[in-house]
Image (cartoon, grey):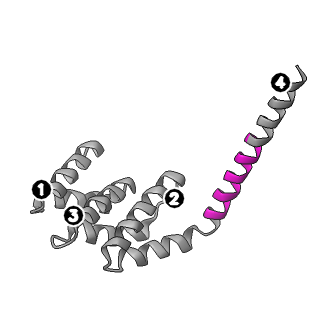
Amino acid sequence: MKRLLFLLAIVLIIITNAVQAQDAATRFQKQHLKQTEASIVNALNSGNVGVEIAAAQTLRQLEWTFPDQEFNSTISPLSQIVKDEKGNTQARLLAAIALDGLHSDLGDEAITMTAKSSSNKSVQELCAALILTTGK
């Protein structure tokens, strides 16, 4: 019985410490969110496909972590990537998904335009599917 109580106490301590560490990380991220957003915008405007892809994925993760944050400054660079017919397909697909996650009218407009006019079948189909899920 003592072992069970001891084990239970250790598990509770570990869980409590993990939750506190996660809260501290989230507080730190929130304090530096504007700087992070500015860095993401710079990365999206870099012209380097790998950097653009990483920035779009990072933005998606931030959208999940901070759903109340709007990240408005990323809408324009993401829209440019999505609309760029000469751009990398993977970068365009990921940018479209990130843009859709922002739930903005400007982003939805860029996705709609791309769904109607893109010559890249993959990008066009993804954008069309994103339009269907948002109901626009």
Three-letter amino acid code of the residue under disc 2: Gln
Mark 3 surroundings within 10 Å by alpha-carbon count, few (fewer than 14), some (14 through 19), many (20 or more): some
Q: Label 1 belongs to which residue?
A: 121
Q: Which of marks 2 and 3 is nearer the N terminus?
A: 2
**Would you say 38 lies left or right of 54 here?**
right
Vertical arrangement, residue 12 with respect to residue 70, above or below: above
Mark 2 nearby-residue class (10 Å; few <14, some 14–19, many ≥20): few
Residue 117 lies, in percent from the top left, at 11, 61
In whole angstroms, how far apart are the C-alphas of marks 4 and 1? Answer: 60 Å
Mark sitting on residue 4: 4
- Residue on which the image places disc 3: 89
Chain-order first, disc 3 or disc 1: 3
- Residue 118 horizontal/vertical position (percent): 12, 62
Q: Disc 2 vs disc 1: Cβ atoms closer than 8 Å?
A: no
The residue that appears at 45% across and 62% down in the rendered structure is: 58
The residue that label 2 is drawn on is 69
Query: Which quarter of the figure has residue 8?
Result: top right
Residue drawn at (12%, 56%) of the image: 121
Q: What stretch is highlighted in magenta?
A: 15-29
